[in-house]
Structures are given as C-alpha cells and as structure tokens.
C-alpha cells in the first residue's frame, strides 16, 4: 500500500493533469481506504480478487483519455515520464505501445511451444529498444488499440495479459518500444500471494496463451511437462 500511495502522490500532482484510475481487486492491506486520501482518483472497488486481467479490462473501460498507461501498483513513475510516453505515440504511428525503462528485467521474446517461458532481460540503457514482449508493469498504448481488442482475454489471471497484448501488437505489424531516456522504478517487495498460487497462475497463463495461439495440443503438452493440471488462476478459477 505504501508503494501505491507514493505512486498516487506523484501522478496526482496538480500540474500533471492526468486521469488516474485504481481498480482495487479485493485488497486486504488497507488500499481501499486511499480513496479518502486521493479524492481526485477514480477508485473501482471489487468485492474480491477477480484476477489482474479482469481488473485491467475494468480500468480500460473506465478510461476517458486518448492514451492509457497500464501500471502495476508497485511502479513509481513521474508525470513528466507519462507525458513523454504519450509524446512518442503522438509522433510515431509505427509504434503501438511504449514503456519506460525499468530498474528490473522487462523484455523478452514472445513465448512459443519450444520456449514457453523465456527469461526477461534488461534493455540497454540510454537507447530505445524495440521488444517483442514486455513485462507489462508499465505499458502505454492508444485507447482505441485496447478497445479494438474488445477486451483482454480473461482466461489469463494475474499472468498472461501482457503476453496477449504484445501478441496483438505483433499481429498489427507495429512496434513496442522501451524508451531508454524515460524511466520508472519497479518496487522489489515480494508479492503477498503465496508462491504456490503464483506458480500455478503462471503455468495456467502460459498454457492458455499456447493453446490460443498454437493450438490446444500445445497448451496440454505444456501442462503435462510442468504438471500444471492442478494450476489455477489467482482468482481461483481453473
């Protein structure tokens, strides 16, 4: 909650002029009480954890601006950096999404059956990097791009939405850029979710991605190799 508070303080500075939406996915750490502290932020409070992907869809539908920045609650970014991301989308029609350079690994190839979970790497400092797939901790795209997707496939729970967005961008023939001179800080606190739940959600998300883009057999084979038949999404569904 402290990281979210710091992020909201930065993004709601009077001179920022940003619309800020927080989707509270049934939190139990007191984050819901931040609505009193930040009256200019639109809070959407869900009764329980419906999964990160559904929360993204709710936030996207509520957004009213031309550019939408999807931001994890543990990422600190300054308004000037947000505006710099939007400037690139304004100027370059060949770019579908932009990301700040984080202090954590954030780029990799898109998964495929031969490499279902490629490791993330750190982009070069000080230069823009075109990436096939990014972590999704901080990703901006045009609002009409997100809406053209209809919604992000909610077969993904906490893990998988970023892969799906990146795949849709590849299909569109446009680029994802990580900007070397625009930075944000990704927090290092451990997730409050049990490690076993995160592992199951990740395996389920990868299997869903492979099934959707490479056929059901690819997803089943991945589940067999990882013993992920009992994996569930963070929201508790299979």
Image (cartoon, helix red, strand yellow):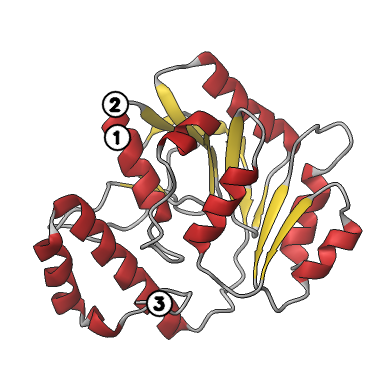
Q: CA distance from mark 2 to mark 1?
A: 5 Å
Q: Is residue 128 left or right of residue 102?
A: left
Q: Which residue is mark 3?
A: 237
Kindly identify the residue that appears in the image at 43 percent across and 66 percent down: 157
Q: CA distance from mark 3 to mark 1?
A: 29 Å
Dot 2 alpha-carbon crowd within 10 angstroms: few under 14, some 14 to 19, many 20 or more: few
Residue 33 position (above or below residue 41): below
| C-beta proximity under 8 Å, tags 2 and 3 | no
Q: Which of the two discs, 3 and 1, labels the residue nearer the N terminus? A: 1
Q: Which of the two discs, 2 and 3, labels the residue nearer the N terminus? A: 2
Residue 207 position (above or below residue 108): below
Closer to the camera in the image, 230 or 101:
230
Residue 66's disc is none
Q: Which residue is mark 2?
A: 173
| C-beta proximity under 8 Å, tags 2 and 1 | yes
Closer to the camera in the image, 43 or 204:
43
Dot 1 alpha-carbon crowd within 10 angstroms: few under 14, some 14 to 19, many 20 or more: some
User: In which image quadrant can residue 203 be found?
Assistant: bottom left
Q: Pinpoint residue 94: horizontal percent, then vertical percent.
A: 39, 19
User: In the structure shown, which secondary structural element does the residue marked by tag 3 occupy?
Assistant: loop
User: In which image quadrant can residue 174 be found?
Assistant: top left
Kindly identify the residue that appears in the image at 86 percent across and 31 percent down: 15
Q: Which residue is mark 1?
A: 170
Q: Pinpoint residue 24: horizontal percent, then vertical percent.
A: 67, 64
Kindly identify the residue that appears in the image at 14 percent across and 76 percent down: 225
Q: Is residue 147 left or right of residue 72?
A: left
């Amino acid at each position: 909650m402290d990281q979210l508070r710091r992020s909201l303080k930065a993004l709601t500075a009077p001179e920022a002029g940003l619309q800020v939406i927080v989707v509270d996915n049934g939190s139990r750490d007191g984050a819901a009480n931040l609505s009193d502290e930040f009256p200019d932020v639109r809070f959407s409070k869900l009764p329980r954890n419906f999964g990160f992907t559904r929360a993204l869809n709710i936030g996207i539908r509520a957004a009213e601006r031309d550019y939408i920045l999807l931001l994890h609650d543990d990422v600190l970014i300054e308004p000037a950096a947000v505006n710099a991301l939007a400037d690139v989308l304004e100027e370059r029609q060949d770019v579908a999404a932009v990301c700040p350079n984080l202090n954590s690994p954030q780029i990799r190839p898109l998964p495929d059956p031969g490499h279902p979970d490629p490791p993330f790497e750190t982009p070069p400092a000080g230069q823009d990097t075109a990436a096939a797939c990014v972590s999704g901790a901080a990703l901006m795209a045009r609002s009409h791009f997100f809406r053209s997707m209809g919604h992000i496939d909610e077969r993904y729970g906490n893990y998988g939405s970023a892969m799906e967005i990146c795949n849709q961008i590849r299909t569109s023939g446009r680029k994802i850029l990580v900007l070397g001179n625009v930075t944000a800080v990704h927090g290092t606190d451990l997730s409050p979710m049990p490690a076993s739940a995160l592992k199951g959600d990740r395996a389920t998300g990868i299997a869903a991605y492979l099934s959707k883009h490479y056929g059901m057999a690819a997803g089943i084979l991945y589940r067999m190799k990882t013993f992920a038949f009992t994996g569930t999404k963070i929201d508790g569904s299979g």
